[in-house]
């Protein structure tokens, strides 16, 4: 099987198969997530989608997975995940590629819109400390991740969890952006007091999820990335 080349991107048959696999796993993780969580279990996959598939192909794989998953099992808040999950993958891929400018600009835009909104200024700053920390990490992490495929295992074990943190926090930032600056809270007829309560509860859950994603990335993601180096024709990020 030959390679498919378009717009400077090269995909072997193994690479194309991985896109389908990641989209399918994205769907499965969504479907098996217990009810009551703020975000579904696909957040544990997002960093790997970005690192392995790259920012643009990873975005498409996550978009496919999130759309199919919610077509099978729709929820009232379906629009948050369909947008936020691919953006989280995009962020992981951009950092893994060492491309910090696009992601920093995205953060600047969404955070600027958040603080420009009176409701955003009213909510406690501690609820977005992980987002602010992620913003600060974008540049140094992107610089350190250049030539990620060539990094030794010790360095990869350090960088992969940082990429995972930035990716999952970008997912959260996108949801916050949709809820407040975009104004989806008004679509759900939530009062400012309801938004405050939901924001506080979900922020606490988000910090726990940040930690879990970092741990899973270290325990599962790093060995998987190391193993993929041994597969002929597979080189990440792919896009």
Image: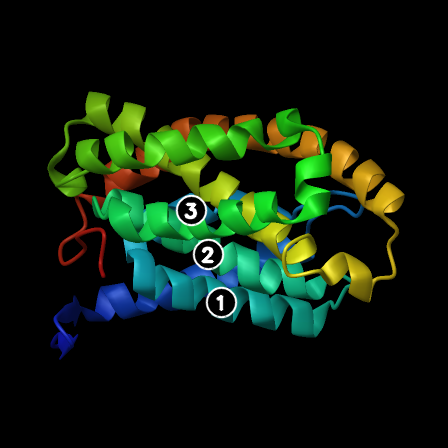
Residue 12: x and y in percent read 18, 68
Relative to 196, 154 lies left or right = left
Give the SS element for disc 1: helix
User: Which label number is shown at residue 108?
Assistant: 3
Q: CA distance from mark 2 to mark 1?
A: 9 Å
Residue 27: % across, % down: 57, 62
Which comes before the other along the chain, label 2 or label 1? 1
SS for callout 2: helix
Disc 3 crowd, CA 10 A, few/some/many (<14, 14-19, 20+): few
Q: Nearer the viewer, residue 56 or 42?
A: 56
Mark in front: 2 vs 1: 2
**Which residue is the site of mark 1?**
63
Q: Which residue is mark 2?
A: 87
Disc 3 vs disc 1: which is toward the camera?
3
What residue is rendered at 18% in x and 39% in y? 148
Q: Nearer the viewer, residue 45 or 234?
A: 45
Quadrant assignment for the C terminus: bottom left
Residue 171 in sight: no
In the structure shown, which secondary structural element does the residue marked by tag 3 occupy? helix
Observer able to see residue 198: yes
The mark found on residue 162 in the picture is none
């Amino acid at each position: 099987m030959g390679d498919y080349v378009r717009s400077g991107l090269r995909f072997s048959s193994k690479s194309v198969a991985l896109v389908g696999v990641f989209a399918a796993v994205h769907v499965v993780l969504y479907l098996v997530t217990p009810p009551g969580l703020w975000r579904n279990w696909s957040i544990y996959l997002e960093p790997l989608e970005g690192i392995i598939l790259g920012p643009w192909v990873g975005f498409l794989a996550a978009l496919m997975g999130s759309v199919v998953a919610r077509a099978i099992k729709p929820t009232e808040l379906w629009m948050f995940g369909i947008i936020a999950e691919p953006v989280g993958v995009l962020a992981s891929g951009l950092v893994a590629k060492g491309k910090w400018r696009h992601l920093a600009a995205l953060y600047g835009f969404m955070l600027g819109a958040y603080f420009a909104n009176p409701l955003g200024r009213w909510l406690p700053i501690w609820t977005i400390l992980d987002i602010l920390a992620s913003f600060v990490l974008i540049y140094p992490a992107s610089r350190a991740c250049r030539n990620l495929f060539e990094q030794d295992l010790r360095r990869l074990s350090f960088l992969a969890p940082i990429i995972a943190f930035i990716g999952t926090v970008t997912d959260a930032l996108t949801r916050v952006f949709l809820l407040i600056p975009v104004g989806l809270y008004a679509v759900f007829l939530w009062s400012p007091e309801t938004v405050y309560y939901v924001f506080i509860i979900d922020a606490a859950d988000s910090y726990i999820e940040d930690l879990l994603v970092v741990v899973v990335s270290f325990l599962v993601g790093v060995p998987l990335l190391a193993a993929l180096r041994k597969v002929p024709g597979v080189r990440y990020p792919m896009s």
